[in-house]
Image (tube, grey):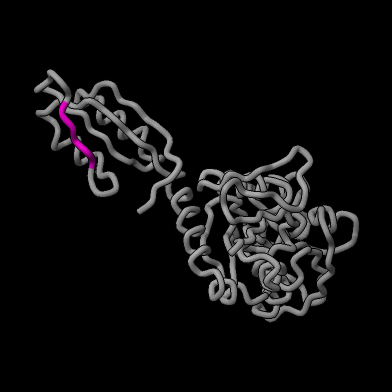
Amino acid sequence: MTLRVAVPNKGRLSEEAIDLLKKAGLGIEETADRKLYAAVKNMDFEVMFLRAKDIVRFVHSGVVDVGFTGLDLVMEAALDVDKVLDLDFGHCRLVLAAPESSGISSVEQVPNGSVIATSFPNMAWQYFARKDKMVEITQISGAAEVAPHIGVADMIVDLVSSGSTLRTNRMREVETIARSQAVMITTADARKNKGVEIEELVTAVQSVVFARCKKYLMADVPVNVLEEAKGLLPGIEGPTVMDIIDRDDMVAVHSVVDKDRVYDTVAALKRLGAKGILIMPIDRIVP
């Protein structure tokens, strides 16, 4: 059965999702003028390019079986879909922000009756209801940070990553409402009908996500410090140690290391006398 997969049609989420699928082994046949559909070479897949905010609805309705979108959009839609995988990109936060001149630094200081501009009205309502605050929500489609400065709203609820756009517009973060990242979603019905196909795709994508934070390290290590080197290179199931032809004083050690440990690990291996250290990227790691 054909597995229908939806990815965002533009932006960083789109680029990252397509890269993820390609590294997972899907030969997506893209065209310069990307259309709604793309075939996958020699595989029973169909990729659809949709607006990120529409993907949740299309997955929920069964038009597509699996979708890649932002967790913030899933939470805002509040539809019955299942998150099957965090994808570890597209990280951002939904925050309440106020003009610096307002003096507001906590939600408790927000006056009842305040007007809040946002493109996430459902999440904003839920947030202020939890805080027992009576506010007016006005829905906008973009550039929320300018709303207080043109008199449209008193404060905003909006997505931020670094927060630089807020600071540029003289806005202050008051509180984080939710954290988001790109996720892979499906439904119970899709799993019932295409469970094997979906599980195989999840496993393939998960292997790429896992590999992104790892590097493959190879080094020639003196035999007399091998035990110390093993302590630096835990690997997946432990490092691989191999003999080097015509050398009885050195062995070749191969291991998978965390990307954020590569610098310290290489420095420590050099101190032990390791040579020929090679670091390589990994496309996939299948447990």
Residue at x-position 69% and y-position 57%: 159
Query: Is 19 displayed left or right of 33 in the figure?
Result: left
Q: Nearer the viewer, residue 153 or 21?
A: 21
The percent coordinates of residue 140 (x first, y second) are 84, 62
Task: Answer whether residue 109 is visible to the viewer in this image.
Answer: no
Which quarter of the rendering shows the C terminus? bottom left
Query: Is 97 displayed left or right of 221 in the figure?
Result: right
Residue at x-position 77% and y-position 79%: 134
Query: Is 159 displayed left or right of 35 in the figure?
Result: left
| Residue 19 magenta | no
Q: Nearer the viewer, residue 58 or 86?
A: 58
Q: Nearer the viewer, residue 83 or 63?
A: 63
Residue with the most extreme top position: 246
Residue at x-position 11% and y-position 28%: 223
The answer to whether residue 76 is above or below residue 280 is below
| Residue 242 magenta | yes
Residue at x-position 52% and y-position 59%: 86
**What range is drawn magenta here?**
239-243
What is the count of numbered marks?
A: 0
Residue 148 figure quarter: bottom right
Residue 175 figure quarter: bottom right
Q: Main secondary structure of the magenta part?
A: strand
